[in-house]
Amino acid sequence: MNNSNHGFEEDWVILKSFFPNNWEALAQETHALKGLRKDKTAESLLRTLLIHVGCGYSLRETVVRARRANLAQLSDVALLKRLRKSAHWLHQMCCSLFEERLGGMPSDQSPTMHMLDASIISEPGKTGSQWRLHYCLSWPSLTCDFFKLTPVEGKGNGESFSQFPVITGDYYLADRGYSKASGIRHVTENGAHLAVRLNPDSVRMLSANGQLFPLIKKLKTMVKPGCTAEWDVTIADSADRLAATGRLCVIRKTEEAIRLAQAKLKRRAQKNHMTLRPETLEYAKFVMVFTTFPRESFPAATVLDWYRLRWQIELVFKRFKQIAQLGHLPKYDPESSKAWLYGKLLVALLTEKIMAHAERFSPWGYDMERVTHSQHLA
């Protein structure tokens, strides 16, 4: 074995150490190996799938590389079928890694929360097309219960609650890109509840008397880090058509978090040759979430906790968005597309786990195997 192959195998062994403990058992339980040749293993299958979803190679190039690495002898059509069969396996591995990351967060006793997001997918090559992938993950099952592709350009293709079917009585969590009156109205008119990070520049907030809500005045009363408040508000569009009545739940950031947020805004403004408004710097001191969640079950602190969960998953989404710029989405097959999505999320979660682990790596680069009995180290 040459040195490059040795390094390749060593890297794989290290990568495997970050997998969920039961990853091979999950392959059996989810029937991902059904129909696989007896001389092939869950390990060779996963390595082949990761060439496609992790490295971004097309199905055709993946099978060539898998054949040369003696991982699999199959066609691109067979690989697509195998990817589809592995969707549940990849999903269960994602769930296991999410549980590691979000241990202690509300789950079994919690209502179903639908976490919405979108990502731009650029297919490789100068002529590669761009798509916006709208997807919804439900907590605590972490299943992808909705998946939709739209062109990037064109009216009605942007981030919005309106891109998603809404189930009466369910709960929806989204980031500030979804803070638009029309989308909020879509949720409330269908009898569901939402919590969305407020973008004060994209909606109008009214007080109970119908006047413009004095947001800056209210925020300036919150001077201590960790201070929370909630106010009854109504969301309206530019024509003052009502979209929803609910609460604005706010928490003031720490001084360090404020410094970082304002520095980021200043860098962006300088890069784009823009002048920052004073209120924009004031908004950066707070996390503001508009919600229609029932007050009796979701006091302000609970709403903010749920948004914190959404933000923890958003960190993985951000990693996913970076990874999703690579690869060929099998966009004409919804089932294999979902498997591809789970594969991307798996890579994102592994990346997050490796980065966290790297902060405490030993000087030699890996963890020493745990010794179960007394022995000398020679």
Image (cartoon, rainbow, N blue to C red):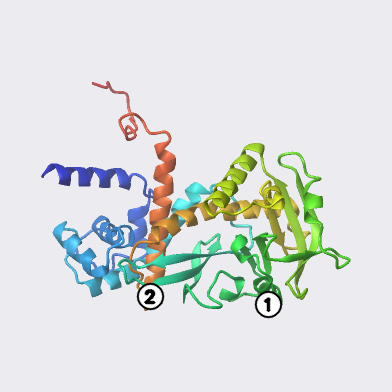
Q: Is the residue marked by circle 1 packed among few (<14), some (14-19), or many (20+) residues within 10 Å?
A: some
Residue at mark 2 to residue at mark 1: CA–CA distance: 29 Å
Instruction: Give the mark nearest the N terminus, 2 or 1.
Output: 1
Residue 213 lies in quadrant: bottom right
Q: How many discs appear?
A: 2
Residue underneath mark 1:
190
**Residue type for callout 2:** Lys
Asked whether residue 35 is in view, the answer is no
Q: Residue at x 62, y 40 (%)?
A: 259
Q: Is the residue marked by circle 2 packed among few (<14), some (14-19), or many (20+) residues within 10 Å?
A: some
Is 322 placed above or below 161 here?
A: above
Q: Position of residue 138 (x, y in %)?
A: 55, 64
Q: 138 or 257: which is nearer to us?
A: 257
Q: Position of residue 256 (x, y in %)?
A: 62, 37
Q: Residue at x 23, y 72 (%)?
A: 76
Residue underneath mark 2:
331
